[in-house]
Image: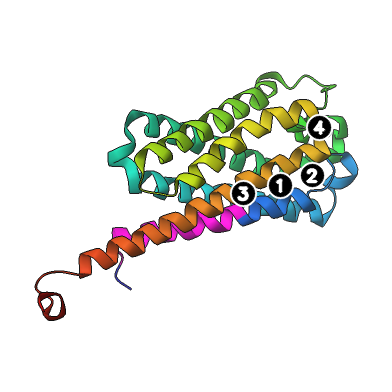
Amino acid sequence: MHITPSVLIRGAAVSAVVAGIAYILIQFIHPADEVGSLSTQAWVNVHVLSFAEAVLALIGLTGLYLRQARVVGVLGLVGYVMFAFFFVLQSAFNFAEAFIAPLIAIDAPQLAVDFVGLFGRYPAVTDLGPLAALPGIGAVLYVGGAALFGVAVIRGRMLSRGAGILLIVSAALTPLAGVLMPHALERLAAVPMGLALVWLGYSLFASMRTSDAQQSFTPSDPIAAA
């Protein structure tokens, strides 16, 4: 297969769709953030899936940005960088949850629970040092990055404006859910974000298909000339 920029961006579109579906699925199968869960295969499976989802989302987001880089300006770049760094942070944290936290739980169960509960709004018993800042950093990157990127999508007019709006709404729902809902239900606020990623991925794929069709329709084509 001949690798072209069009093929790579189509691959990024598929990555965004798969990441969105995985992001939704994870919210319904995630085990409780407690020491008893850390030794289970379900815990490892979910966080390996979460790691893969974060990597695929990063690939998809990069394709989404590159497709509209010329029209989204500085706002789009800032939104992309912030949102992309969130997925970098998520992938690193999920890797540690899958493969490091279960090992720590053997000799230091409280430390392991405090670590995996960082994003679960559980007060830590042990001193986690700089790691305690991760939830705040992650929230700024997630909410701010998604909102700015959504605005850029709307202004760029190359991808679905509805998907951009859903991305902004999803970003706004997250802090509201954190305030109004217990953590078990707060996870459901991630469902609209997953749907936004699916929608954006589909929109990107469709835009590439339209662009390729327009490029193949030239005046030198006998049918077009007729």
Quarter of the image where the N terminus is located:
bottom left
| Among the two numbered marks 4 and 3 on one chain, the one whose residue lies closer to the N terminus | 4
Frontmost residue, 195 versus 16: 195
Name the residue at 64% across, 23% down.
136
Other-residue count near label 2 (Cα within 10 Å), few / some / many at <14 / 14–19 / ≥20? many
Q: Which of pointers 1 and 3 indicates the residue nearer the eye?
A: 3
Residue linked to disc 3: 194
Q: Nearer the viewer, residue 140 or 118?
A: 140
Q: Which mark is residue 111?
A: none
Secondary structure at badge 1 equals helix
Can residue 100 be seen? Answer: no
Vertical side of 127 occupied by 216: above or below: below
Distance between the Cα atoms at labels 2 and 3? 27 Å
Q: Which residue is mark 1?
A: 99
Residue type at mark 4: give it.
Met
Q: Which residue is mark 4?
A: 181
> Which secondary structure type mostly characterizes the magenta part of the structure?
helix
Q: Nearer the viewer, residue 36 or 176?
A: 176
User: Magenta region: which residues?
Assistant: 3-20
Is the residue 65 above or below the residue 78 in the image?
Answer: below
The residue singled out by tag 2 in the image is: 102
Q: Of the residues shown, which amino acid type is indicated by label 3? A: Gly
